[in-house]
């Protein structure tokens, strides 16, 4: 009997000897977001962080504020913090390569979301959760061909060197140029409404006979639509965006914008976070590419896709 008690006591002491932190230390995942003033990326990053928390994983969210050097530093900070995995939406195809290489060398698994580095570096990440950007550009091109006669087109292409922007542009050009449309203005920039206004104004000064303005996201498109309206060309110059933000859907409904491509940043974020969580917690090897759905939205569909709670705030009526 005494031996049994002593054995039980010894086992209890061994359990107590294990540091509490070693038993309860949560998994931590770093998130390197490219922009903090882009509503789509803000919603996407927040969705990732919230989903990780739901899975019992601590998120460490850092934003590069559209600065490649800042993103490199952010990834370096996450490596130094010895996180268990890193989710990266790189600003362009090359800038963060060395930082991601350091993460891999440190044994930290890397996942790409929304954007990816150039495919020649594909051995650096386990999985990419993102849109088929060529297909998105193709869809925008098909919409334009179906809704406008051939003519001059301006392109606000977004961040220079960003893979999804390049692929989206390639898909769009392939469709429209084969149907007689001509790109007469193409300019990269940050994806803000202010840049959309300025670039669209420049394009309209040089080519007042534009039939369309392609924008790589909704913020650029909303700015371009404002410039078109100010120039008295609403309805004559079709403006197209990407993301399907409620503000953009309201602009499509009112006719200020012609169309947008709807993505779902909340669902996208959940998918990215769950992919990482399943890998860390359940040892599930993810697919190399996890494509997200997209949908082209014109004026007739826009109203129904605006969240009802936001319609009054946005001044939208059916």
Image (spheres, grey):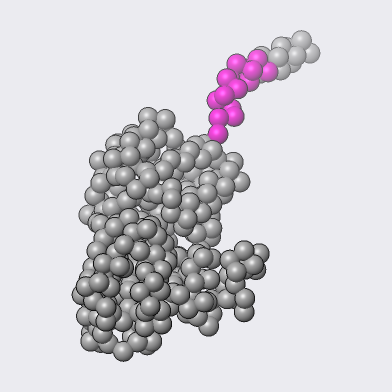
Residue 278 visible (yes or no) = no
Count of marks, rendered view:
0
Q: Is residue 65 above or below residue 175?
A: above
Q: Quadrant of residue 24?
A: top right
Could you tell me which quadrant the C terminus lies in? bottom right
User: In the visual, does 209 lie left or right of 111?
Assistant: left
21 vs 239, left or right, is right
Q: Does any portion of residue 49 appear in the rendered image?
A: yes
Q: Is residue 229 above or below residue 291?
A: below
Quadrant for residue 79, please give it. top left
> Which residue is outermost to the right?
1
Identify which residue is drawn at 71% across, 14% down: 9
Q: Is residue 3 magenta?
A: no
* Residue occupying the point 57% across, 76% down: 303
Q: What secondary structure is the magenta-colored segment mainly?
A: helix
Q: Residue at x 71, y 17 (%)?
A: 8
Q: Is residue 9 left or right of residue 183?
A: right
Q: Is residue 273 above or below residue 17?
A: below
Residue closest to the eye, 191 or 78 = 191
Quadrant location, the N terminus: top right
Between 268 and 237, the residue placed more toward the observer is 237
Q: Position of residue 179 (x, y in %)?
A: 25, 87
Viewer-closest of 48 and 229:
229
Whole-percent x and y of residue 259?
43, 76
Q: Residue at x 27, y 78 (%)?
A: 208
**Could you tell whether 280 is left or right of 139 in the image?**
right
Magenta region: 12-26
Residue 186 position in % (x across, y down): 23, 68
Q: Position of residue 39 (x, y in %)?
A: 47, 55
């Amino acid at each position: 009997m005494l031996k049994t008690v002593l054995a039980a006591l010894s086992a209890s002491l061994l359990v107590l000897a294990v540091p509490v932190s070693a038993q309860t230390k949560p998994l931590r995942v770093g998130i390197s977001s490219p922009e903090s003033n882009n509503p789509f990326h803000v919603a996407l990053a927040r969705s990732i962080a919230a989903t990780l928390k739901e899975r019992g994983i601590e998120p460490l969210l850092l934003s590069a504020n559209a600065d490649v050097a800042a993103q490199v530093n952010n990834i370096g900070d996450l490596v130094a913090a010895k996180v268990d995995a890193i989710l990266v939406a790189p600003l362009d195809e090359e800038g963060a390569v060395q930082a991601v290489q350091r993460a891999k060398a440190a044994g930290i698994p890397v996942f790409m979301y929304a954007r990816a580095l150039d495919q020649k570096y594909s051995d650096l990440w386990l999985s990419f959760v993102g849109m088929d950007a060529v297909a998105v550009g193709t869809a925008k091109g098909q919409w334009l061909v179906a809704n406008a006669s051939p003519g001059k087109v301006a392109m606000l292409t977004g961040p220079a060197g960003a893979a999804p922007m390049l692929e989206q542009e390639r898909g769009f050009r392939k469709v429209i140029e084969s149907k007689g449309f001509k790109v007469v203005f193409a300019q990269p920039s940050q994806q803000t409404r202010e840049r959309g206004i300025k670039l669209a104004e420049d394009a309209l000064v040089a080519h007042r006979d534009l039939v369309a303005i392609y924008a790589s996201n909704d913020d650029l498109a909303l700015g371009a639509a404002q410039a078109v309206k100010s120039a008295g060309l609403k309805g004559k110059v079709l403006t197209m965006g990407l993301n399907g933000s409620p503000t953009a859907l309201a602009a499509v409904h009112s006719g200020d914008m012609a169309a947008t491509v709807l993505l779902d940043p909340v669902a996208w974020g959940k998918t990215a976070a769950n992919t990482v969580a399943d890998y860390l917690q359940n040892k599930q090897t993810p697919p190399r590419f996890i494509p997200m759905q997209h949908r082209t939205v014109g004026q007739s569909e826009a109203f129904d896709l605006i969240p009802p709670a936001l319609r009054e705030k946005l001044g939208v009526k059916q």
